[in-house]
């Protein structure tokens, strides 16, 4: 076998891996330095390619961030929609499964850094903000609302305002993700916590408040 023949498959594999390498490098740098402060050539260097190669795949830094968002979050949302479509068990189990999946696949992974990027810089990039709303916020919200409605219609959850309940469900997980990529990344005393445990406590609290069998008493301050 000639040297050309032996190296061709390796080169092909390297070429096929480049988009993922670029997205991984971009995500890491956007979280570390911020989207606005990161230069395209820094992403190329981190990924081990030329700046021209980067632009071949992603013509602008905005397109690169959109690809990072779609690649890391779009698939998780689509998978969650498939689970909701096929799930036949209790709605409480379905809701807990979705929240645990989100934390495992997004919140506790490098993808969780996307929330830090969006929270800190999206105000200066309205096109990215609209993209994030259309590709992430709206479909993820619809998925959770659909799950809540399923539980109410089956008599498993007590009636609650869907939109507000959806926000109450996801907000603590986003906070944990932000903590992981800010205070959690600093070796400061008292800044560490067990996010997996917090997620489980959150699920338990939310489900105990949703289950139809539970009698909930509201105590008003005197």
Image (cartoon, grey):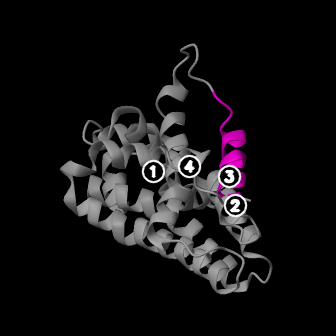
Does the magenta stretch mainly form a helix, a strand or a loop? helix
Element class at badge 4: helix
Q: Is 87 displayed left or right of 163 in the figure?
A: right
The residue lying toward the viewer, choosing from 163 and 20, is 163
Question: Does the magenta run of residues contain 196?
Answer: yes
Element class at badge 1: helix
Q: Residues within 10 Å of mark 3 (few under 14, many from 20)?
A: few
Where does the image place residue 58, in percent across and percent down from the top left? 34, 60
| Residue at mark 1 to residue at mark 3: CA–CA distance | 40 Å
Mark nearer the viewer, 1 or 2 = 2
Name the residue: 51% across, 62% down.
73
Question: Does the magenta run of residues contain 171?
Answer: no
The residue lying toward the viewer, choosing from 120 and 53, is 120
- Mark 3 or mark 4: name the one nearer the start of the chain: 4
Q: Quadrant of the N terminus?
A: bottom right
- Mark 1 or mark 3: name the one nearer the start of the chain: 1
| Residue at mark 1 to residue at mark 2: CA–CA distance | 40 Å
Residue 114: which numbered mark, if any? Answer: none
Q: Which residue is mark 3?
A: 205
Mark nearer the viewer, 1 or 3 = 3
Is any part of residue 87 visible from this angle?
yes
Most extreme residue toward the top, as rendered? 189
| Residue at mark 3 to residue at mark 4: CA–CA distance | 13 Å
Residue 22: which numbered mark, if any? Answer: 1
- Mark 1 or mark 4: name the one nearer the start of the chain: 1
Q: Residues within 10 Å of mark 1 (few under 14, many from 20)?
A: many
* Span of residues in magenta: 193-208
Element class at badge 2: helix
| Residue at mark 2 to residue at mark 4: CA–CA distance | 15 Å
């Amino acid at each position: 076998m000639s040297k050309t023949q032996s190296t061709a498959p390796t080169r092909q594999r390297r070429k096929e891996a480049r988009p993922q390498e670029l997205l991984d490098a971009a995500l890491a740098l956007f979280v570390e330095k911020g989207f606005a402060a990161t230069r395209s050539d820094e992403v190329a260097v981190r990924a081990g390619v030329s700046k021209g190669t980067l632009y071949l795949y992603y013509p602008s830094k905005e397109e690169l961030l959109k690809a990072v968002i779609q690649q890391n979050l779009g698939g998780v949302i689509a998978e969650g929609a498939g689970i909701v479509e096929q799930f036949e068990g209790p709605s409480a189990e379905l809701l807990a499964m979705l929240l645990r999946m989100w934390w495992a696949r997004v919140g506790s992974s490098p993808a969780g850094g996307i929330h830090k990027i969006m929270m800190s810089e999206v105000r200066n990039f309205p096109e990215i903000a609209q993209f994030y709303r259309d590709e992430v916020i709206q479909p993820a919200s619809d998925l959770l609302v659909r799950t809540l409605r399923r539980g109410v219609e089956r008599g498993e959850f007590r009636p609650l305002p869907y939109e507000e309940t959806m926000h109450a469900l996801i907000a603590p997980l986003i906070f944990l993700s932000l903590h992981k990529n800010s205070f959690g990344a600093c070796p400061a005393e008292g800044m560490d916590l067990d996010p997996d445990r917090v997620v489980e406590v959150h699920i338990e609290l939310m489900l105990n408040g949703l289950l139809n069998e539970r009698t909930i008493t509201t105590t008003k301050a005197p």
